[in-house]
Structures are given as structure tokens and as C-alpha cells.
């Protein structure tokens, strides 16, 4: 199986740790390996062939972190044009180098997963289901709470002789009451954005329901050499295309395999705190010169030598880096993205 890791995004919800120049998948947030390196470690367990799709501005950082990967396995976008186009980019390269019936798994670089064996088994189950049913197959996560930050997959009947289910519909980021109803119904899964299928399976569905993606693929495939400057020029001419909107929501011929592994999309400091081991008071400290007193449920990281003193607080995140200082209630830490937008406006 071929694994394609999508390594993009700006990660502004984890500012000031993550910045547009050095986003979260390049950071060591949950251990000694960065999120990208951990994703690569898992991908090597799935199959021998791994590709990384990343944007030109981050390419050197990505290459530095994955120094054992051949240069030809880094697929560098000259500019961001959405997940739909980066998948089409990878499909075009794979079409030139590999068997068109070999399964391909598209995964993301910024997810926290501990159960590698379950991860591998789920992707292999999805590949088998795709081969047997000729359906692009997704991985769905069993919801643990009524999240309003994820899309939901409504699963239907089983796909014969597989571990997969047909997909009835996609529901994008619902309000809280609707999310509660999805969790209670029991037949909804979180959409984690993983897609599995062969080149032939992907292209069959793209040609059937996704004309914008087909146009992008045809534009790239007509360029004789992917290293020719015209290849990048062609790519930059594309409009932004999101795979969920262009393919997933338009198709009535997809399948989903429920994940058999733990999964977390670290999209806020609340998530980051939960992904790390806390002490008896529910606190997690990272860095030096941290002085605490009477704290509960607090995440503190100090990346500088100056002392950070936090006293008598609960449900707080405190981050000190050369990029800036953040102090926020953890349950409001999603608003960091809005604050970063204001900072960019002021600095423009």
C-alpha cells in the first residue's frame, strides 16, 4: 500500500507554539517526535512507499525532519490550492510511477495516534473494502462527545464481505444540539479526512462526480515532466478545491470503515493538554523556570529562560515563546485563531 501524508496547514489555533512559518505538524507536542515524524513512523508500518505532500514554504523543514526519505518522495506544492488539488497532485505522480490498482491511503500529518497496530489494521481494512467494492473508502472515528468542530459521516448498511459500511450522507460541523442527536443515534462517525482507494478507483469516482478535480488532474497529466516549470505554473492556475466538498459530499458511492485506533486532532490547547500526561492536580508543565502555586487543570509551557510564575488558577493555558505570550481559559482557546488574525492585521 502507498501512504500519502498531507503536511499542510498553518496551525494558528496553537499560536504562539505554532506559526504560519513553522506550523504544528513540525512541533514536538506529545513526545520526542514531531507530529509529522510520528505520522511518518506510522506510515512506514502501513507499506513500503510513503509520499509527503507539502507546501513550498515548509518544504525544507519537512525534508530536514524526514532525512531518510528519498527526495523524489517529497511532493512540493508551489502554493496552497486546497486538499482536493494536493490529492490530485499525488494521484498524478503515482500514476506515473506505480501500478494503478495498488491501494493508496491519504492521511494527515497533525493527528495524535497511539495505537499504531490498530491504525495499520484500519487502513488495511479500508484498502480491502475499496478493492472489493470499487468504492473510495474513508476512515470514521467513533464520536466520544457531541463535537461541533468535526464533520460527521452517517453510515448505512454493511458492504458485503468487508468491515466497511456504505455512507448515507455527510454532515458538516453541526450545532451542539444536532451533534448530540448524532451521537445518540449511534450510526454517525467523525470524519477524520482519511481516504483510501487505488488510482483507478479514485479516478473513476472523480470522473463521475467531481469535474473540477478531473480538470485539475487532466491539466497536470498533460505536462510531460513533473519537474518542468510549466507543471508548477499549471498547479498555481487552479482554484482552491477541498476534497470533502468536491468529492465526498457529491458522491453516493463511498464506504467507511470505523476506526479501531485512538485518534485526536490537536486543534486547541485543550486537546493538547489532554494528549499529554498530567500530574495529580491535572497540570502539565513543559520547559524550565516554571513556578506554580495552587494550580488545577493548567497547561504551562515556557520556551525561554525568563521565569514564568502562575498562582491560584484553574482551567488555564499559559504559553511563553519568542513568538509571543498567550494566557487563556482552556475552554476558550479556540479563539486564539481570531487573535492571530488581529495580530496579522496590526502587523500588516
Image: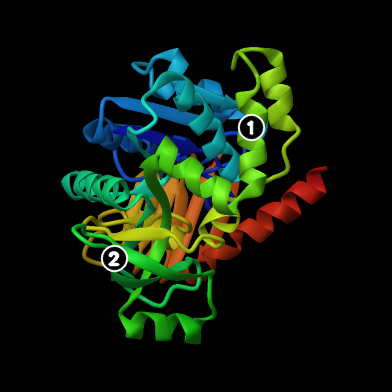
Q: Position of residue 180 (x, y in %)?
A: 41, 84
Would you say residue 32 is visible in this rendering? Answer: no
Numbered circle sitting on residue 282: 2
- Report the label total: 2
Would you say residue 200 is visible in this rendering? Answer: yes
Local secondary structure at mark 1? helix
Q: Residues within 10 Å of mark 1 (few under 14, many from 20)?
A: few
Foreground tag (2 vs 1): 1
Numbered circle sitting on residue 25: none
Image quarter of residue 19: top right
Distance in Å between CA atoms under marks 2 and 1? 53 Å
Numbered circle sitting on residue 218: 1
Q: Position of residue 255 (x, y in %)?
A: 36, 59
Q: Position of residue 199 (x, y in %)?
A: 43, 36
User: 103 or 265, which lies in front?
Assistant: 103
Local secondary structure at mark 2? loop
83 lies left or right of 189: right
**Residue at image x 65%, y 48%?**
211
Image quarter of residue 3: top left
User: 81 or 42, which lies in front?
Assistant: 81
Q: Residues within 10 Å of mark 2 (few under 14, many from 20)?
A: some
User: 225 or 298, which lies in front?
Assistant: 225
38 lies above or below 133: above
Give the mark nearer the N terminus: 2 vs 1.
1
Which image quarter is the N terminus in? top left
63 lies above or below 336: above
**Residue at image x 18%, y 58%?**
161
16 lies left or right of 104: right
Which image quarter is the C terminus in? top right
**Residue at image x 80%, y 50%?**
345
Amino acid at each position: 500500500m502507498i501512504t500519502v501524508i498531507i503536511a499542510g496547514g498553518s496551525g494558528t489555533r496553537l499560536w504562539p507554539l505554532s506559526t504560519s512559518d513553522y506550523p504544528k505538524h513540525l512541533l514536538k507536542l506529545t513526545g520526542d517526535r514531531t507530529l509529522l515524524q510520528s505520522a511518518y513512523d506510522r506510515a512506514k508500518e502501513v507499506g513500503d512507499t510513503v509520499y509527503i505532500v507539502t507546501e513550498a514554504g515548509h518544504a525544507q523543514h519537512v525534508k530536514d525532519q524526514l532525512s531518510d526519505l528519498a527526495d523524489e518522495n517529497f511532493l512540493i506544492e508551489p502554493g496552497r490550492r486546497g486538499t482536493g488539488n494536493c490529492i490530485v497532485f499525488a494521484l498524478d505522480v503515482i500514476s506515473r510511477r506505480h501500478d494503478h490498482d495498488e491501494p493508496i491511503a491519504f492521511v494527515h500529518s497533525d493527528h495524535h495516534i497511539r495505537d499504531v497496530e490498530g491504525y495499520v489494521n484500519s487502513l488495511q481494512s479500508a484498502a480491502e473494502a475499496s478493492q472489493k467494492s470499487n468504492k473510495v473508502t474513508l476512515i470514521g472515528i467513533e464520536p466520544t462527545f457531541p463535537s461541533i468542530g468535526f464533520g460527521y459521516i452517517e453510515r448505512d448498511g454493511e458492504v458485503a464481505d468487508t468491515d466497511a459500511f456504505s455512507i448515507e450522507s455527510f454532515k458538516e460541523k453541526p450545532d451542539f444540539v444536532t451533534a448530540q442527536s448524532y451521537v445518540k443515534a449511534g450510526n454517525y462517525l467523525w470524519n477524520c479526512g482519511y481516504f483510501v482507494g487505488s488510482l483507478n478507483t479514485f479516478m473513476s469516482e472523480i470522473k463521475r462526480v467531481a469535474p473540477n478535480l478531473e480538470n485539475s488532474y487532466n491539466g497536470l497529466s498533460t505536462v510531460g515532466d513533473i519537474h518542468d516549470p510549466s507543471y508548477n505554473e499549471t498547479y498555481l492556475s487552479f482554484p482552491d478545491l477541498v476534497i470533502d466538498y468536491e468529492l465526498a459530499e457529491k458522491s453516493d458511492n463511498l464506504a467507511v470503515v470505523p476506526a479501531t485506533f485512538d485518534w485526536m486532532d490537536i486543534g486547541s490547547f485543550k486537546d493538547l493538554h489532554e494528549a499529554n500526561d498530567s500530574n495529580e492536580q491535572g497540570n502539565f508543565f513543559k520547559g524550565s523556570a516554571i513556578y506554580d502555586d495552587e494550580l488545577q487543570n493548567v497547561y504551562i509551557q515556557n520556551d525561554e529562560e525568563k521565569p514564568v510564575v502562575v498562582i491560584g488558577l484553574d482551567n488555564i493555558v499559559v504559553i511563553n515563546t519568542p513568538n509571543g505570550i498567550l494566557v487563556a481559559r482552556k475552554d476558550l482557546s479556540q479563539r486564539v485563531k481570531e487573535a492571530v488574525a488581529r495580530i496579522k492585521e496590526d502587523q500588516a
